[in-house]
Image: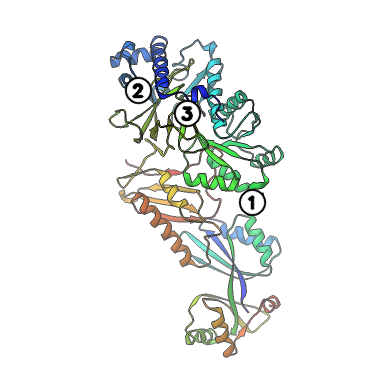
Amino acid sequence: MTVKQISVFIENKEGRIKKAVNAISKEGINIRALSLADNTKYGILRLIVSDNEKTKEVLKAENFIVKETEVLVVGVKDEPDGLNSTLEIFENANINVEYIYAFVSSKTDEAIVVIKIEDYEEGIKALSKENANILTEEDINQL
Amino acid sequence: MIWNKNAECMSREEKEELQLALLKEVVKKAYEKVPFYTEKFDKAGFKVEDLQTLEDVSKIPFTTKDDLRKAYPFGLFAVPDEEIIEIHSTSGTTGTPVVSGYTKKDLDIWGECAARAIVMAGGSSKSKIQNSYGYGLFTGGFGIDHGAKTLGATVIPMSSGNTERQLKMMEDFQSDILTCTPSYALYLAESLEKKGVKPEEISLKAGIFGAEMWTEAMRSELEEKLGITAHNIYGLTEIMGPGVAAECIERNGQHIQDDHFYPEIIDPKTEEVLGEGVKGELVLTTLTKEGMPIIRFRTKDVTALRKDKCPCGRTTARIDRVTGRTDDMLKVKGVMFFPSQIETALLSINGLTANYQIHITRPKHLDVIEIKVETSPELFTDEMRGLDALEAKIAHKIQNTIGIRVNISLVEPESLPRSEGKAIRVIDERNFD
């Protein structure tokens, strides 16, 4: 039930993010969600895209370091307590959240949250018990 | 195989006898034919007759790079200009260029020395040598070329650059020996890898690499990536170019052609001659060069001299891998180290390459070292703390090696400049004004 996210090493240098994004969009690949973690010297660009294989291929061709990472994608109610109640599920199950980012889609009322945790088995178990809406790759492609 | 058993396997006694005879001859000729030496010897109170034993060599004054610069362009030639048939020169990036002139006999000897080097790497008259050293004023391309011709091997005069074509020729011509700078060899290896060509799909058996400093770790990497034995070769424009010394298949030091060059190791500060196995500055005297004899040239290269017999059967003296230059030595926060030490530390971490650059700055009158290191797919993790930990690990390793704290910056692969000649490893922006 996890989804494969693309992670890219980005040196803190003019034009690198644009170069990565440009390489992807030129191929007609759709970026569904994106986040950037950074310090003063470099960052990690994380992407949910419509075609992982193609994305890896075009980024590698441009000398980027690319990795696929497993993440959970969860639909949460787009209301004040939405995200909080999802995080509470992890907290109650003692599951550490490594990072999180969110996006919205016009095709659903829910906000879509991308979550990286250490233990997916436990995480999915906890979410399912609370009837959380875990999205699959097909679900995301419909958005 | 040994190219010239007589010369390369001569007993130490015989060799020293020959060296002394040749030294007497060359010192006398230099004194008589080159005003620079006349003046230098007279000023130092050295008389040609003072040279009676090899120990007496220490009485002869040194020749420095500055001396050679002052003689630019032809001031040190010992023969009429028309007897010179080939000229080489340093690039002059650090000052006035140094010029070297060769007579017909000098070129024959150069070819002989370079041929010995190629045979030491396993080459023969059947070899196809892809010569990717630059052809031109730089001695690299022509030096190997002269050696290949003396040997009767096939030389493919690629010169440096045009990597695409280098790879095509390597595959199409099935070259079995590659000669170039080690950093360019690494670049070619990476390019092959990128093309998906495996070491067993090319015909290379040996590489003869020189003209810049490299490390044992880099040797392992080159040997593995290209499926070759990688041999260090030594030479310098002032003396002859590649072939002055080179490694045999044992790869335990470079055999110096000591029937043509007389090596000494000195303490760079006291100028005292040091014993076997002691690290110091290499000093060379040409024993047979006609065009431009050089007496006791201070190479600034840091190495040690070994005279024990090599398992390969050769008795020629050997010099260790050059680990630094007396003037490359970096002094940061009062600590001396060589860039090669940083390279060794980096390569001890799995997944790191030898692509790095040292930046030294001095904000607020305190030295700061930043080392840019190219990261690799093996080392990349999706979490910032993973990358922070990697930086800390690299910094720790280097700190353990050189004893001072450094800042590490991970950069994207292939973002540091690759030169087709010498790699720029150090950028020192300290301003001491």
- Amino acid type for the residue under numbered disc 1: Lys
Q: Residue at x 66, y 51 (%)?
A: B196
> Badge 1, how many Cα within 10 Å: few under 14, some, many 20+?
few
Give the CA distance from mark 3 to mark 2.
Answer: 17 Å
**B214 over B307 or under it: above or below:** below
Query: In terms of depth relative to the viewer, which is nearer, B208 or B141?
Result: B208
Give the CA distance from mark 1 to mark 3.
Answer: 33 Å
- Residue tagged 1: B194
Label 2 marks which chain's residue? B
- Residue tagged 3: B236
Whichever of labels 3 and 2 marks the residue nearer the N terminus, that label is 2
Whichever of labels 1 and 2 marks the residue nearer the N terminus, that label is 2
* B80 sits left or right of B40 in the view: right
Q: Residue at x 60, y 23 (%)?
A: B150
Q: Residue at x 50, y 48 (%)?
A: B354
Q: Quadrant of residue B25?
A: top left
Q: Secondary structure at mark 1?
A: helix
Dots 3, 2 in contact, CB < 8 A? no
Position of residue B53 measured from the top left corner of the image (x, y, whole percent): 33, 17
- Amino acid type for the residue under numbered disc 3: Leu
Position of residue B189 measured from the top left corner of the image (x, y, whole percent): 60, 46
Q: Quadrant of residue B392?
A: bottom left
- Residue tagged 2: B62
Task: Determine if marks 1 and 2 fall on one subunit.
Answer: yes
> Badge 3, how many Cα within 10 Å: few under 14, some, many 20+?
some
